[in-house]
Amino acid sequence: MKDSTTEQKILEAAINIFQKKGMAGARMQEIADEARINKAMLHYYFRSKQRLFEAVFMQTFLKFAPQINEIFSSDATVFEKVRSFVDRYISFVQENPYIPSFLIQEINNNPEFAHNFFNTHGVPDPSPFEKQITEEIEKGVLKTIDPKQMILNLFSLTAFSFAANGLVKGLLNIDEENFKMMMEERKKLIPELIISSIKNYG
């Protein structure tokens, strides 16, 4: 009988190894060593590296998607949703720093798996937010904008610094502590930038 504690320990070890080496570079023996179990036990829980990767990917993604859907489908205003999205995303990634690069790397490296996964489990659904943006444009609250472009701007401005963590630190010549401080500042800067660009002041 499989033990949930051991299984979670394996998943956490796999996250560490996949984060460092990616799917292709990771070895089952390394993951077993990281989890402090033997390779036979690792194969008992997960028969192959692909199955282990899929379990890690699912655990990672399912931490992220529900939080985003909750914001998109809430009764909050567009401006409140922008602020909530940025604050929730940055806080979540600060607690789980491997997630952006891990997701982007593996979605790009395994497009077939990603396609099948999203068809099965779904992705964050921005359609309620898009509808709300369209309604606010019609009321004159927002400028005439493409809702998809606005949502893309929201994701891009919030996610880029984490997905390109090393590039940002090198370009700005900052250490981890200063990076964290800048991300806290961006919780306020990004919403104000987006809101000022979409709000109809006329």
Image: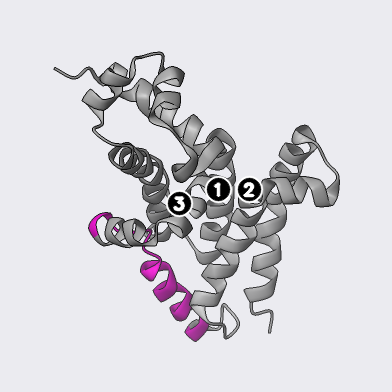
Q: Position of residue 32 (x, y in %)?
A: 39, 21
Question: Which SS class for mark 1?
Answer: helix
Indicate whether 44 appears above or below 15. above
Question: For the residue marked with disc 3, what is the amino acid?
Answer: Glu
Question: Which SS class for mark 3?
Answer: helix
Question: Which comes before the other along the chain, label 1 or label 3?
Answer: 1
Q: Position of residue 173 (x, y in %)?
A: 86, 45
> Quick one: label 3, few (<14), some, or many (20+) residues within 10 Å?
some
Range drawn in magenta: 120-138
Residue identified by numbered label 2 = 162
Question: Which comes before the other along the chain, label 3 or label 2?
Answer: 3
Q: In the picture, which quadrant includes the C terminus? A: bottom right
> What separation in Å lies between label 1 and label 3 (alpha carbons)?
8 Å
Secondary structure character of the magenta stretch overall? helix
Q: Residue at x 28, y 40 (%)?
A: 51
Asked if residue 66 is among those painted magenta in the image, a careful observer would answer: no
Q: Position of residue 178 (x, y in %)?
A: 79, 37
Q: Nearer the viewer, residue 109 or 91?
A: 109
Indicate whether 146 appears above or below 174. below
Residue identified by numbered label 3 = 106
Residue identified by numbered label 1 = 101
Nearer to us of marks 1 and 3 is 3
Left or right, 71 with reference to 50: right
Left or right, 154 with reference to 67: right
* Quadrant hosting residue 3: top left
